[in-house]
Amino acid sequence: MKKLQILGTGCPKCKTLAANTETAAKALGIEYELVKVTEITEIMKFGVMMTPGLAVDGVVKSSGKLLSPDEIKKLIQ
């Protein structure tokens, strides 16, 4: 099971990234757990300075931009 982490404080872009990530994971048919990391101190532990960010299994794949479901699919396969 993949652990998909959305790094962000809950801004509109963060919420959209979470929705797009779920769409991508469902389209791929993978088992996943979606976790929203909203505490600034936790986000900083990932080394992310600009949100929203996406981490897959604890590894940051993107930060500072809103990804489409198609872009996310490439990162979580």
Image (cartoon, rainbow, N blue to C red):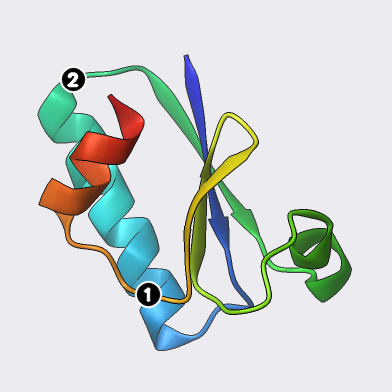
Horizontally, residue 68 falls left or right of residue 63, namely: left
- Relative to 39, residue 21 above or below: above
Residue 68 position by quadrant: bottom left
Q: Residue at x 47, y 14 (%)?
A: 1
Per the image, label 1 sits on a secondary structure element best described as loop
Q: Nearer the viewer, residue 63 or 23?
A: 63
**Residue 16 x %, y %:** 31, 71
Q: Amino acid at mark 1?
A: Lys
Left or right, 19 with respect to 8, comes to left
**Image vertical order of residue 43 relative to residue 35, above or below:** below
Alpha carbon of mark 2 to alpha carbon of mark 1: how far?
Answer: 24 Å
The residue wearing badge 2 is 29
Instruction: Give the x, y percent position of residue 28.
Output: 16, 25
Which residue carries the number 1 mark?
65
Rendered location of residue 19, percent (x, y) = 29, 59
Which residue is most to the right?
Answer: 41
* Numbered disc 2: secondary structure: loop
Three-letter amino acid code of the residue under disc 2: Gly
